[in-house]
Image: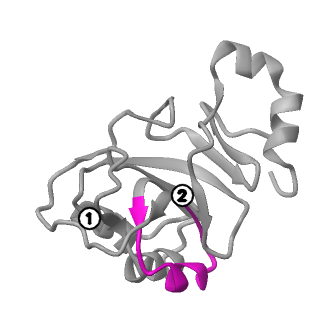
Amino acid sequence: MALVTTAEVCDANPQLIVSGELRALQPNFQIYGRRQVFSGPIVTLKVFEDNVLVREFLEEKGNGRVLVVDGGGSLRCAILGGNPVVQAQNNGWAGIVVNGCVRDVDEINGCDIGVRALASHPMKANKKGIGEKHVPITIAGTRISDGEWLYADTDGILISQTELSV
């Protein structure tokens, strides 16, 4: 879906919006990383102030996927830092959306990957390895399931039950 904005997708698909097959996340996210426009199939993760599983996912081959992390909206520490983002870039992830904080922003902004997060924070996350993989999550007022598609640009983030073509 190259060179089509999220606004154009919304305008072209009112029936998908009405049915709930196409949803927009509330505009709570800051834009990080060099790639401002990205899309791909979603992998979900639910953690709280713990980044072990986030790092494990990003060490895998991304194959153009987008990792969507429900970090519980915590603003008390960062669950994503520069080293995992570099790893994600090198492993072919299209992007990362974090309902939580990032750190090492200068390093993240140097990476050719799309990153969305609530804010930046200097404190590190815990390292207990507690969380749930591939489960439905709800962030920014939107329920998101593994295997759905995410489309992001500077206007916002869309979630679609299926890959969209225009």
Q: For label 1, count other residues whose C-alpha is less than 10 Å away and answer few (under 14), some (14-19) or many (20+).
A: many
* Horizontal side, residue 5 vs residue 67: left or right: right
Q: Which of the two marks, 2 or 1, is nearer to us in this view?
A: 1
In the rendered image, which quarter contains the C terminus?
A: top right
Label 2 and label 1: CA atoms lie apart by: 19 Å
Relative to 88, is 160 above or below? above
Identify which residue is drawn at 83% across, 57% down: 2
Q: Is residue 119 visible?
A: yes
Work out whether residue 111 or residue 149 is closer to the camera in this orientation and state it. Answer: 111
Residue that badge 2 annotates = 65
Q: Position of residue 129 (x, y in %)?
A: 15, 60
Identify which residue is drawn at 72% across, 14% down: 18
What's under tag 1, amino acid-wise?
Asn
Dot 1 falls on a residue whose secondary structure is loop
Residue that badge 1 annotates = 51
Q: Which residues are magenta?
A: 101-116
